[in-house]
Structures are given as C-alpha cells and as structure tokens.
Image: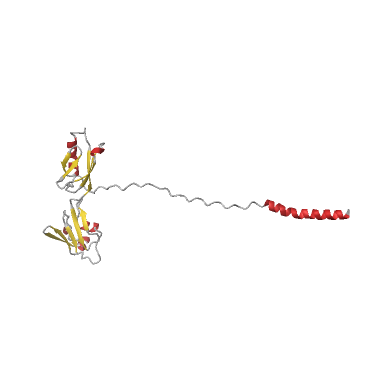
Amino acid sequence: MRGFSSMGLALALCLVTASPWLTAQEAQPPAAQPQPAPEPVKPEVVETTKPMTVPAAVDPNSYKLGPDDVVFVRVWREPDLSGTVAVRPDGKITLPLINEIQASGLTPVQLGAEVTKALSKFVNNPQVMVAVQAVRSKRYYMSGEILRAGAYPLASPTTVFEALTMAGGFHEFANKKKITIIRGGKRFRFNWNQVVKGKNLEQNILLESGDQVIVP
C-alpha cells in the first residue's frame, strides 16, 4: 500500500504541475494571420471637354468686317443654316439657301440684319446672330527690342501704349525714348518714359491697320 501511495502521489503531483502549463497554452489566442494589402484605389477619370473657341473681343455695333475675318452665323433653331464662315477676298460669305452675301464693310449687327432679310424668303421669322470669331483683316505689327514681336489683331481701338503693354514689355537694352510708328510714308515718335509720367500724351495715338511699331 505504501508503494502504491508513493506512485499515486507522484502521478498526482505531475498532473497538478502540468495543468497550469496546458491551461496557459489553451488560453493563448491564435496567432494573427497576415491580412492582404488593400487594392490601390484607382483615381476617377473625369472627362474634360474641348476648349471652346473664344470670340474676338470686338464691338458688334462698330467693328467693320473685312477679308479673312471669321464669323459665326447662328440662326435660332436652324442648326443646318448656322455655322462658321470666313469672309472671302471679294468681301462676301457663302451661306445655305441664300448663297453669297456681302459682309466686308458691314458690322456684325448689320450683317445679321442682311442675313435675316435674305433668309425671310425661305424661313418664317428667322432670328440671326453674327459673332466675330477671329480678326484677320486688321492687324498691326510689333518689332525690335520687344518681348513678343509679331502681328496683332486690331479688334478694338488700341493706343501705342496699350500695344506695347500687350506685347509684354521691353528687352533690357531697348531704347524706350525713341519708339517709331510707321504708317505708310509717315513716321510718328513715341517716348514711353514720358507717357508713363503723364507727359506729352498726344503722342499716344490710336493705331491703324497696317501700322508698324518699332522699338530700337
């Protein structure tokens, strides 16, 4: 009995000793499994519209159309009769139904009235709008020590000072006191420094089509 009791006691001690270890193992939470990386979010593609043609900044009541000018003729609710056309060298434009019509020498408002009159033979109460899309018949030219030399549309009344400003200003060694405007056989002088100070403003003349502004 004594031998049996010793063996039983040893077995009991082993069970008691092992029990906390087993319990701790069982109590441990399972190891966290690695989560898959989230898929990158694709940026939303937004469709952009094509840039619209911006009409030239002209006064439709005073600007006189000329050859090579581009106009948009819109007939209300008549898309087949509307469209963009260029003034031909002979001063005329071609439109559906009415064929040729004189445009050169007319303002956009006057041309609209003429188109309305001509279309009245084919369309009941036509409503016509004419807008200038590009000025090509009237230009002035900038050259010399100016940042942006080249031809500029004369879409509205423009002074020498305004033209020089729109051309971006001068190069470093430009002689701003001896600017010349050539108009056919005539020569005009322009002193930028004086005009900036408000002196001799009569030299700040309005440019005409074909004028050349030269900055030495």
- According to the image, what is the colour scheme of the structure? secondary structure
Location of residue 103 in the rendering, given as x and y in whole percent from the top left corner: 16, 44
**Residue 84 sits in quarter:** top left
Q: Left or right? Give the position of 32 relative to 84.
A: right
Near-viewer residue (148 or 61)? 148
Location of residue 96 in the rendering, given as x and y in whole percent from the top left corner: 20, 38
Task: Tell me which residue sits at (68%, 51%) in the image.
Answer: 27
Q: Left or right? Give the position of 79 relative to 43.
A: left
**Residue 211 sits in quarter:** bottom left
Location of residue 176 in the rendering, given as x and y in whole percent from the top left corner: 21, 64
Q: Left or right? Give the position of 50 relative to 27.
A: left
Task: Tell me which residue sits at (24%, 40%) in the image.
Answer: 82
Q: Left or right? Give the position of 114 relative to 39.
A: left
Extreme residue in the right direction = 1
Q: Quadrant of the C terminus?
A: bottom left
Location of residue 139 in the rendering, given as x and y in whole percent from the top left corner: 18, 53
Extreme residue in the top direction = 124
Near-viewer residue (178 or 200)? 178
